[in-house]
Amino acid sequence: MKTAKFALLTGRDALSRVLEGIEAGRAAGLGPIKVNCVVIRGFNEDEVVDFADFARSHDLTVRFIEYMPLDGKKDWDRTQVVSGAEMLGMIRERYALVPVERASRSETATRYRFADGAPGELGFITTITEPFCDGCSRLRLTADGRLRTCLFSSRSHDLKFLVRGGASDDEIRQFLIATVATKEAGHGINEPGFTPSAETMASIGG
């Protein structure tokens, strides 16, 4: 990724720091190191194969993520979504890939390794075109203490109020059980009337 494009996408000129951080993690023996890549049509879909090269040459896990309505400005447009299948097809024009068995039913990424045994792994998170809501077991705790049962939910549950209010472990446990029981059946992005969250991914956390 070019420096100017990174700055435009992330809001900060920090590509060199990120690359240095990846190398520092490798030098420290951390692993697997995962790099998330959100692919947006008309912006960076021409770099999908480059990121696969990056995974091979640096022994990284690169996760390709379909563009989701989480910009907070409601500028998201379905025509900007590059499907996981399309990304996979781009990479397979250069490399043979073999699937990696899912570690659990709730795993979000469909994973592949290079058939020639080269290092690195690729994953595809297809939230828009192939939703995995029926296997999702995730909860998200925001930095300000709110529990969300779905990344795209319009509701949040105030866990901080309980914790700071002196609630017992059992009261917190019961609150979590009751909250999980309200978890949505699906994110609803592909349903009529879906309203994107007014919060950005950065403010939600993740």
Image (cartoon, rainbow, N blue to C red):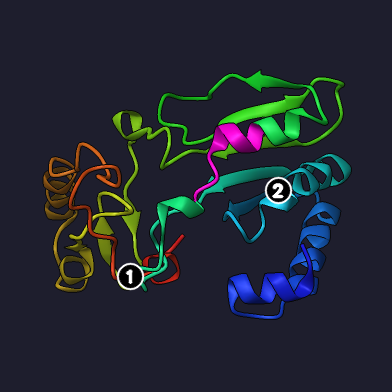
Residue 75, quarter of picture: bottom left
Question: Mark 2 or 1, which is nearer the eye?
Answer: 1
Q: Position of residue 120 (x, y in %)?
A: 78, 36
Which residue carries the number 1 mark?
199
Residue 136: x %, y % from top left: 34, 35
Mark 2 or mark 1, earlier in chain: 2
Give the magenta-colored segment's residue range.
81-88
Q: Is residue 205 left or right of residue 7?
A: left
Along the line of sight, which residue is nearer the eye, 150 or 158?
150
For the residues labelled 2 and 1, the Cα–Cα distance comes to 27 Å
Q: Residue at x 37, y 66 (%)?
A: 204
Mark 2: secondary structure: loop
Q: What residue sits 53% from the left and 23% below the top?
A: 102
Locate residue 134: give its quadrant. Answer: top left
Residue 3 bears which disc, if any? none
| Residue annotated with mark 2 | 33
Residue 82 is inside the magenta segment:
yes
Q: Residue 11 versus residue 135: which sits nearer the camera?
A: 11
**Residue 45, how many percent across, how many down?**
66, 51
Q: How many marks?
A: 2
Q: Is residue 12 above or below residue 82?
A: below
